[in-house]
Amino acid sequence: MLQISRLTKRYGRVTALADVSFDIRPGEVLGLIGPNGSGKTTLFECLAGVLPADSGDVLRDGRPVRVSDRSSVFFYMPDGIAPWPQQTVRWALKFAEGFFGNLDRSDCLVRLNSQTCTRSFQLEPLLDARISELSKGQRKRVLLAIGLMTRPPVLLADEPFDGLDLKQTREIGAALRSFAREGRTLFLSIHQISDAARFCDRFVLLSAGRICGDGALDEITARTRTDNLEDAFLALT
């Protein structure tokens, strides 16, 4: 569906992204793996059009997607944000449902409503809490719910499991996989490699702003002659 071609971003003499190229396939959970400072957030911001790249293209069916049109393809959910802090979770979900429900949905195969999101992300006990009162993990669940009610076909989520305990991570990961099976494309930046290996179909491995490997788990481990994603990443970097 999408090809990322030679995306490059520099900050003065520092190259944050260098000729980054990979593809995003419809209905998959794609994991972005890399240490702190590897360029993961910069990559998401350039894809979403929040940050201008110095060079490179995002291609859809072989045609470049202009920066001004990126919001029709990607919805970016940054890490650590707390929108509408004085509003309740119930208000935020209803607002997102009403706002995005009035937009053209032709590009997206699956769109969730607030009721489905409340159930899938276990938000019922939180509905009357203000956004500012939520823990980091609770806020993550609300933001994922909002992200999955949006129009663009690809959801970019930065650290979606940060703040969740083991049980919550497995439950939310299973919910995300079910949405991907229904046709939603998820590109997740994940710090914990064990979580990525459990939930993602394919992986993009990023180190010092460069792609050091990409593909399915069996492809990457076969290429590096390792037994797991963590060892494969270490071997490639």
Image (cartoon, rainbow, N blue to C red):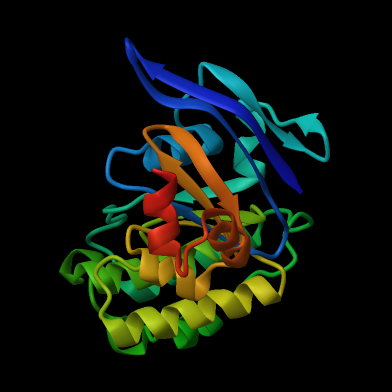
Q: Residue 164, how many percent across, how many down?
A: 28, 75
Q: Residue furthest top?
A: 12
Residue 93, compared with residue 79, is above or below; it is: below
Q: Foreground residue, 54 or 96?
A: 54
Q: Nearer the viewer, residue 96 or 160?
A: 160
* Number of marks in picture: 0
Horizontal side, residue 85 vs residue 179: left or right: left
Find residue 58 and report its horizontal and vertical position in percent: 67, 33
Quadrant for residue 165, please give it. bottom left
Please report the residue visible at 37 percent of the width from the left and 83 percent of the height from the top: 123
Can you see residue 92?
no
Q: Residue at x 47, y 41 (%)?
A: 44
Residue drawn at x 50%, y 32% is 46
Residue with the most extreme front position: 225
Give the side of residue 40 with respect to residue 166, left or right. Answer: right
**Closest to the observer: 51 or 82?**
51
Coordinates of residue 30 in the picture (x, y in percent)? 57, 59
Q: Nearer the viewer, residue 58 or 229?
A: 229
User: Which residue is found at the position 44% from the left and 46% from the top?
Assistant: 236
**Quarter occupied by the C terminus:** top left
Evaluate whether residue 66 shows in this view.
yes
Q: Is residue 141 left or right of residue 130?
A: right
Q: Quadrant of residue 60?
A: top right
Q: Residue 134: x, y in percent?
A: 20, 71
In the image, residue 10 sits, relative to residue 83, either above or below, namely: above
| Image quadrant assignment for residue 7 | top right
